[in-house]
Every structure is written in C-alpha cells, then in structure tokens.
Amino acid sequence: MSEVKRCSAKRKQEVGLRLLRGERLDALSRESGMPAGDLSSWWDEFLVAGQAGLKWRSEDPRVDVLERELKRKRTKFGEMLIAKELLEYRIARHEGEAPIPKRRSNR
C-alpha cells in the first residue's frame, strides 16, 4: 500500500499557479513526486475556487436583504444631504449672507 502524501493549501496553490502559467502536468507530477491525478484534482479545485472568488453576488438570501437595506439607507442619506444644503441656503439668505454659489451642470 502506498503512503498518502498530504500537502498544504499553499503547495496546492503553487501547483495551480504553475499550471496556470502553462507548465505541463506530467512534468510537475515527476518533479513533485505526486500522482498526475492528484495534481489534476487540485487544478480543478483551484479553478472552481477562483470562479467562486470572482462572484460578486452571494447566494445567501440574508445578503440580498442587507444590500436592499444599504441601498435604501444610501438613498435616504442623499435626500438628507440635499435637505441640509437647502436649509443652509435658506438660513444664509434669511440672515443676509451671500448665497451658496450655483453648481455647474455635468452636461
């Protein structure tokens, strides 16, 4: 019975990066002494983990709820900033100070 070698995640990552750079699986297998099937499995896991890392949406429904709440609060915050600027303008006008200069259009 052959001895099963355990490798760290860092070692698996190194193998995945080397394969990504175009090194041959059989050459890595010979160099490392690991079966090509194991390296191939690590490569598959490496690619799946990379795809998962690139997903920007969570499959957890609680995240969707929190994202909607964040959007609602950002909208409310923007409305409050506009109201604050209008109040400052009205106070300045009432007290005879120079009005807030008009903002230039982004067009």
Image (cartoon, rainbow, N blue to C red):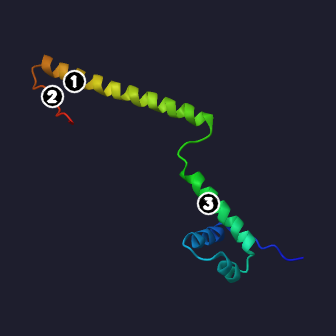
Where is residue 21, by image quadrant? Answer: bottom right
Q: Residue 88: which disc? A: 1
Residue at the image position 63 percent from the left and 68 percent from the top: 10
Where is residue 84, by image quadrant? Answer: top left
How many labels were placed on the picture?
A: 3
In the image shown, does 83 or 59 lie closer to the viewer? 59
* Amino acid type of the residue that numbered disc 1 sits on in the rendered structure: Glu
Q: Residue 47: which disc? A: 3
In the image shown, does 40 or 46 lie closer to the viewer? 40
> What residue did someone put label 2 on?
100
Q: Quadrant of the C terminus?
A: top left
Residue at the image position 18 percent from the left and 20 percent from the top: 91
* Amino acid type of the residue that numbered disc 2 sits on in the rendered structure: Ile
Foreground mark, 2 or 3? Answer: 3
Secondary structure found at label 2: loop
Query: Label 2: few (<14), some or many (≥20) within 10 Å?
Result: few
Foreground mark, 1 or 3? Answer: 3
Left or right, 42 with respect to 4, comes to left
Q: Is residue 80 above or below residue 13?
A: above
Verify CB contact (< 8 Å) between mark 1 and mark 2.
yes
